[in-house]
Amino acid sequence: MWRSIASNALTLLIVMMFLGGGLILWGQRSYRTVGPLQQAICVRVEPGSNMTKISQRLEQDGAVSNGTLFRLGADYTDKADQLKAGSFLVPEGASMEQIVDILTRGGASTCGTEVVYRVGITRSEIVLRELDPATNRYVEKAAFVPGTEDQPEAFVQPLTQSDTRHRIALAEGVTSWQVIEELKQVSVLTGDIAELPAEGTLAPDSYEIKPGDTRAEIVARMVDAQAALLDEAWKNRVDGLPLNSKEEALILASIIEKETGVPDERRQVASVFINRLKQGMRLQTDPTVIYGITKGQGVLGRGLRQSELRGETPWNTYVIDGLPPTPIANPGKASIEAALDPAETKFVFFVADGSGGHAFAETLAEHNANVAKWRRIEAEQADQ
């Protein structure tokens, strides 16, 4: 009898071990397999949260099939105590293993709320955006112009949340003065800027920032980015350009930036100025005259007067020969590249064509005809 009992117990033990091993294999497979999430979601981890709370919420949201298994998997891989506060994008079909990695690896938030400080040429604003996980696109929720409008209520909570992302976006063609003035309005930054950066040395781009970053640090990043862009473009420049230095290339790029907002025109506009420099013709471009008046401190807000076109300033290319002494704005990557790789044309004239672009010409007669056409368009627009 005792032999029978022992045999049965051994059999039961073997069955239990077999089932236990199968259960472990099932758990491992379930932990690593494609998850049930049909569409990406944004998971916000509050400071002080724990894996138990997160697992329950993930199960409720349909991101994991079994919250307990999710938590046990995090325990087994020693990641249960490594949760990072923030907002994180969890893609559709993410496995439990992938989700644990996303929520514990750290780094900046990858979704949720974002405050963007947009520095524009004629208008700067602060924008509140929210990432739509389904489309992976940001949706604008609110905006205001600092100094002229009150901050909307919608900004109050996001500006105090530790997982809110912040970024500064510089439009191509803004001046250094405009950038610095707007950086002063960014309340999450600290410190002062000792001196105005040289015109043209700040790269128009989007920069992620963190509360507590200093303004000087952000400016240094912008300067380094522009220097890298200029170095690369200068290294790849075409032969035969009438430009003797990277500084001259930056000056020309800034003029191109201010002369056209049509991306496809940049290399043609560049060719006009390159051809004029080669032929010893004056550049005769209005944006340089405007810079001579404003020094980049704000927008002129009106048309140029004849006296201003004739007035002598170091930047008035109707009066001076060659390039002005400094850039007139901060040019973007495309304009820098256009200055150093212009289109091969014989154009030496261009004028607005009424479509937002320009009409180009090789001869004065062609140019005069284009100007006459533009005057008719201006007259028609004035009558409307």
Image (tube, grey):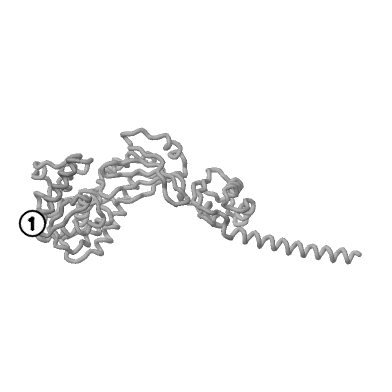
Quadrant where the image shows the N terminus: bottom right
SS category of the residue bearing label 1 = helix
Q: Tell me residue 177's x, y (percent).
A: 25, 43
The amino acid type found where label 1 is placed reads Ala
- Mark 1 surroundings: few (<14), some (14-19) or many (≥20) residues within 10 A: few
Height in image: 357 above or below 303?
A: below
Q: Nearer the viewer, residue 230 or 65?
A: 65
Residue at 45% across, 48% down: 132
Q: Locate residue 119 relative to residue 379 in the image: left or right.
A: right
Q: Tell me residue 291's x, y (percent).
A: 18, 45
Counting every numbered tag in the picture gives 1
Q: Locate residue 200 relative to residue 25 in the image: left or right.
A: left
Q: Mark 1 — residue?
A: 365
Residue at 35% across, 43% down: 117
Q: Tell me residue 220's x, y (percent).
A: 32, 50
Quadrant where the image shows the C terminus: top left
Quadrant of residue 18 within the rendered picture = bottom right
